[in-house]
Amino acid sequence: MKHSCHGSRLLMTINKFLMMITLLLPLVLSGQDDYTQTRKKMVSHDIISRGVNDQATLDAMRNVPRHEFVPQEFRQRAYQDGPLPIGYGQTISQPYIVAFMTEAIRPQNHFRVLEVGTGSGYQAAVLSAIVDSVFTIEIIDELYLQAKKRLKKLAYDNVQVKNADGYFGWASKGPFDAIVVTAAAEFVPPPLIEQLNEGGRMIIPVGTPFSTQQLLLVTKNGGKIKTRNLMFVRFVPFTRDKGS
Ligand code: SAH
């Protein structure tokens, strides 16, 4: 009697285990997570509807798990179209802005891209899903460490992270086909212009800190630099307190 009772319990446990595998396996094999559908909705409601239509950008926004880049307490809000705090007074940008900036550099598979302002590492991950390699610089030590660890854990292997003042760019890795700056500067740092490849595009918020800024598109063609205002935005300030 005792034996058969144990036997049936064991059978039930095995059954439960098999059911779990049957339920989870398709998800694992398709690379999906609990938020796959939520991300698809986010892309159609908040991004395509507002004019972003570059296919590679949209695919990256559908695939990169933004909830992994926000603090645990904000996970439920990871796919709402707003910025979220990431600690140290910094924010992860709203999904629409990340998509807009990604599309604005016209990303291509062979690109080497520099990002200034790693923050959570989300923008770097979105770029890395499209381009050949991403070099990203963060000035706050703790955010640098966290982002580096997170990008490694999530296997974004074509991203290199550096802890420095991004004002100076990353000369040894340049020139870059595109540069994305995600903190508001008072002017475009000359070293970044220098490290932009011929035909390259830079996107950078420029203006007064803690106010609205202009999101500038800076292009370099035949050595000529042109700037164009794409929209008004509000970013955290570009800081200069780390010697580099
Ligand atoms: N791209 C980020 C969001 C950036 S918030 C993301 O996807 O999460 C802006 C970031 O720029 C902050 O983390 C801030 O510390 C960083 N930053 C500000 N000034 C900087 C500088 N001079 N060099 C490098 N990083 C800087």
Image (tube, rainbow, N blue to C red):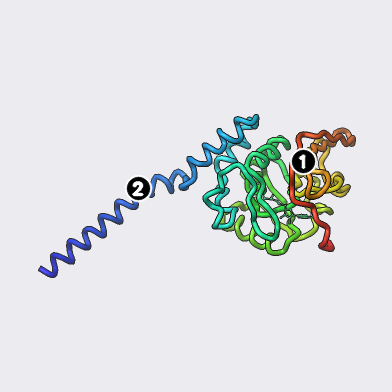
Identify residue for label 1.
203
Residues at marks 2 and 1, CA–CA distance in whole angstroms = 44 Å
Q: Position of residue 217 (x, y in %)?
A: 79, 37
Residue 160 appears left or right of 28: right
Front-lying residue, 21 or 9? 9
Q: Position of residue 215 (x, y in %)?
A: 77, 39
Choose top left, top right, bottom left or bottom right for residue 86: bottom right
Q: Identify which residue is drawn at 85% across, 33% down.
A: 221
Identify residue for label 2.
23
Name the N-terminal-most of marks 2 and 1. 2
Q: Residue pushed farthest front?
A: 211
Q: Amino acid at mark 2?
A: Leu
Position of the C terminus, as image quadrant, is bottom right
Disc 2 CB within 8 Å of nearest ligand 1 atom: no
Q: Position of residue 14 (x, y in %)?
A: 26, 58
**In the depicted structure, whether residue 64 falls above or below residue 227:** below
Q: Secondary structure at mark 2?
A: helix
